[in-house]
Image (cartoon, grey):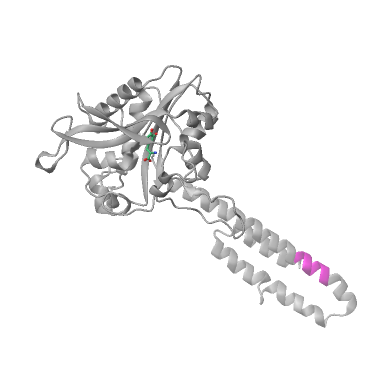
Amino acid sequence: MDDLKAKYLSQIAEASDEAVLEDIRLAAVGKKGEVSLKMRELGRMTAEERQVAGPALNALKAEINSALAAKKAGLADAALDARLRSEWLDVTLPTRPDRHGTIHPISQVTEEVTAIFADMGFSVAEGPRIDTDWYNFDALNIPGHHPARAEMDTFYMHRAEGDDRPPHVLRTHTSPVQIRSMEATGAPMRIICPGGVYRADYDQTHTPMFHQVEGLAIGKDISMANLKWVLEEFVKSYFEVDGVDLRFRASHFPFTEPSAEVDIRCSWEGGTLKVGEGDDWLEILGSGMVHPKVLLAGGIDPEQWQGFAFGMGIDRIAMLKYGIPDLRAFFDSDLRWLRHYGFAALDVPTLHGGLSR
Ligand code: DAH
C-alpha cells in the first residue's frame, strides 16, 4: 500500500496537464484502477485482515483523490494564468476603421441637446418609463375626465383581477419628470429630461415608442421672455445657424398657462429643409408658463415661484437636422441604415468643437 501511495502521489505531482491527470485517476481509483481492485479483494479476506486493510485502503483512496483535486485546481489556475498572459488587449489603441458600429442618431441628438442646455445651466433629470397615472396625468392638471387622456393613445399596464387601483401607464410624455424633479430638488431649478415615451400610434411620422426632451426652469421672476430667449439660443445652436425666426402661436396645454406652440422659419426648396430662411413654418415644440396647479402638485409654492416648461420631440428634430425621412426606420435596427445615419463613436458633440462636424 505504501508503494501504491508513493507511486501515485509522485505521478500526480508530476502530471503536466489535465488529460494526464485523468489517466492517473483512472489507473488508480477508476472502476478498474489499482486501488479499486485492491478494495474488491477485501471480500476475500478474513475479518481481522479486513479490519486493518479496509480503513487503510479507504484512507489511501481519499488521499489520492484529494491530491488529484488539488493538482487539478493548480493546473486550472496555471492554465488561466497562461491565457491571461497571452490574451491581452491594448485599450489605448485607436478604434479600427473597419469596425462599423455607430452611435444611433437619437443618442447623438440627445447628446447635442444636452450639451446646448448644459451650457445654459440646465442639468439632466430622469424618471421611470412606467409611471403612475398620477404623475403622467393628474399632477399635470389632466384630471380623469380630461380629453387629453383619450387623445394621448395611452398604453395601460395590466392590473390583477379585483385590484381596482388605477393602472400604471407607459408614460405618454416626459412631463411627469417635471413633477418628480420638483419633488426631488424643490425650487429654484433648471432641468431637461430626455427619454423614451409611448403612444399607440404607427405611421411614417409616429412610432409606439419615441423620444422627447422636457425642459423646466423655475425661479422667482421667470417670464415668457426667458423662455423665448432660451429656445432661440437652443434652435440656433442645434441647427447651427446664426439667426432664426421663431413664431410663438397661442395654444393650449393643461399644464401651462399661457401656452404656446413654437414654429421655426424654414424653406423646403428643392426638397431639402433649410432652417432660418424661407416662407414656411415648422412646429417643433410645445411650451408655456408652468400652471400653478402643477407647481402645487410638485410641492412648490406658486405664490413665490414661477417657471417655464417646454416639450420637444427628439426624433423629430433628429429627422429635421439630419434629413431622415421616415421615423419608423429609427427602430428597425437595419445595419445599412445605422451605417448611413449613425455617428462615429468618438464624435462626441461639444459646443466648442461644432456640434455635428
Ligand atoms: N407634454 C406635451 C406633449 O407630449 C409637450 C409639452 C407641451 C410639454 C408644453 C411641456 C409644455 O412642458 O409646456 O405633447
Work out which residue is located at the far top of the displayed protein and give it: 221
> In the rendered image, is residue 195 in sight?
yes
The front one of 189 and 93 is: 189
Rendered view: 67 above or below 269: below
> Residue 278's image quarter?
top left
In what quadrant of the picture does the C terminus appear?
top left
Q: Is residue 12 above or below residue 244?
A: below
Q: Residue furthest bottom?
A: 44
Count the labels in the image.
0
Q: Against 101, is 348 above or below?
A: above
- Measured from the top left, where is residue 298 in percent x and y? 52, 31
Q: Residue drawn 28% across and 38% down? A: 317
Q: Please provide percent x and percent y for residue 129.
A: 47, 45
Where is residue 193 drawn, in percent x and y?
Answer: 42, 35
- Residue at the image point whose x is 53% and y is 32% from the top: 297
Between residue 228 and residue 103, name the one nearer to us: 228
Nearest the eye: 291 or 108: 291
Describe residue 160's horizontal placement relative to residue 194 as left or right: right
Classify residue 218 as left or right of residue 259: right
Q: Is residue 261 left or right of residue 300?
A: left
Q: Is residue 55 magenta?
A: yes
Quadrant containing ligand 1 reads top left
Indicate the position of residue 181 as horizontal and vertical percent values: 50, 31
Question: Which residues, given as a range, are shown in magenta?
Answer: 54-60
In this view, 278 is above or below 13: above
Based on the picture, tell me whether residue 34 belongs to the magenta stretch: no
Task: Please tell me which residue is depicted at 40% across the width and 22% down the height of the picture.
Answer: 121
* Residue 126 visible here: no
